[in-house]
Amino acid sequence: GNLGGRWPPTAAFFLVDVLSCHEESCYLQMDGFYTVTILCTIIGVVWLFVTKQLLKGLQEKEPSEW
């Protein structure tokens, strides 16, 4: 199997479980899904801005120049 395609869902499910609060003693009852969604969105937007110039440069080059 392709390990590169299998670990991201496992990591996401792990983070959802870790960031969820299911106990009565928690100050704020929350579902980790929303926290992980916001966190991944922020990381994705930052990644887009950081790599934007690099990706534009690659698009302008011929594939043989890569």
Image (cartoon, rainbow, N blue to C red):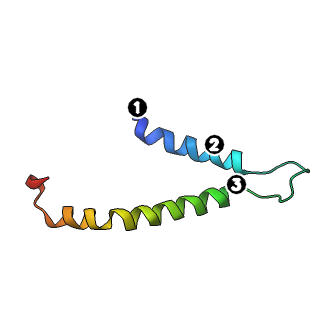
Helix, strand or loop at mark 1: loop
Residue at x 70%, y 45% (from the top left corner): 18
Residue at x 82%, y 58% (from the top left corner): 29
Residue 1 numbered mark, or none: 1
Tag 3 residue: 32
Q: Hey, what amino acid is under mark 3? A: Gly
The x, y position of residue 5, in whole percent, is: 43, 42
The x, y position of residue 26, in whole percent, is: 86, 53
Mark 3, Cα crowd under 10 Å, few <14 / some 14-19 / many 20+, is many
Question: Left of 56 or right of it: where is 50?
Answer: right
The x, y position of residue 52, in whole percent, is: 32, 67
Mark 2, Cα crowd under 10 Å, few <14 / some 14-19 / many 20+, is few
Tag 2 residue: 14
Q: Quadrant of the N terminus?
A: top left
Residue 37 numbered mark, or none: none
Question: Left of 5 or right of it: where is 52?
Answer: left
Among the two numbered marks 3 and 2 on one chain, the one whose residue lies closer to the N terminus: 2
Question: Left of 66 or right of it: where is 7?
Answer: right
In the image, residue 26 above or below residue 48: above
